[in-house]
Image (cartoon, helix red, strand yellow):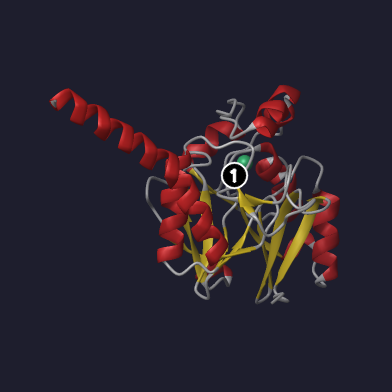
Amino acid sequence: MARPDIITIPILPLGMVNAFLLIVPGGAVLIDAGLPGSERKIRRALAEAGLTSADLKLIVVTHGHIDHAGDARALRDLSGAPILMHEADIAYCQGEQPLLRPTGAFGRIFKMTGAIEAPFPHFTPDIVLSGSEERSLTEFGVKGRVLPTSGHTPGSISLLMDDGTVFAGDLAASGILLGGIALRNRPRQPPFEEDPAEVAASLRMLLERGARRFYLGHGGPLGAAAIQRHVARLERPSAMQGATRLKSAVSEAD
Ligand SMILES: [Zn+2]
């Protein structure tokens, strides 16, 4: 199952925070830059593949949270690789506080620590997706494309490869706490989600477009069936709200 061209970089151990190297002809593409100060870990992963930071062709930042975007500027300085992001998350990389809607008790506690709102080196991405724009990455040697998959944040993006592999950032997570400590195969919401209904719609779109193996920022990877179950769970509360609305509309009509 493990693909030799995908290297998981443990930004924090046990799958708590992942970044990924995708080995491509003549170099590598980095998916997510990790927390500030992650250069050493990323260089080590490159070295394991016989590469150096100069071989980095592109840095895809799935969204503007510190554990994904925190080291992007340093890595660009080190490698010269352009940073690709969606315009809707740029403000989060320039000092604006992200909107943190906890999905449960862990998120609420985590928010109190202030860790995810800590400042990190500001940057402006070099390649910017806007609105519903998609972009093929063939020029970087990747058989796939980045597409907007909003919900976790407004500017969340995913890299969907032609073979069904997808790097989906924090659209879903697995395991307990921040990822892979246990129950790693069980999907769950990450600690924060700006719009769960939008997350469900984005995950559904990825499944419809052939996504089969989801590499995630926290925990994972997960298969399509697990994601399908997760989407159904996410859609349940809104279905309930719909049912309540229907019920009150009916009683009003009475
Ligand atoms: Zn996040």
- Image-quadrant location for residue 65: top right
User: Residue 113, percent across and down?
Assistant: 75, 25
Residue 158 vertical placement versus 67 (above, below): below
User: Residue 254, percent across and down?
Assistant: 14, 25
Q: Which of 94 and 64 is in front in this view?
A: 64
Q: Which residue is drawn at 82% across and 58% down?
A: 43
Quadrant location, the N terminus: bottom right
Q: Nearer the viewer, residue 28 or 162?
A: 162
Asked if residue 52 lies left or right of residue 76, the reply is: right
Q: Which residue is drawn at 44% across and 39% down?
A: 237
- Image-quadrant location for residue 35: top right
Residue 185 vertical placement versus 13 (above, below): below
User: Residue 47, percent across and down?
Assistant: 85, 66
User: Residue 77, percent across and down?
Assistant: 73, 47
> Where does label 1 land, which residue?
189
Q: Please, what secondary structure does the residue beneath circle 1 have? A: loop
Q: What residue type is labelled 1?
A: Gln
Q: In the rendered image, is residue 119 in sight? A: no
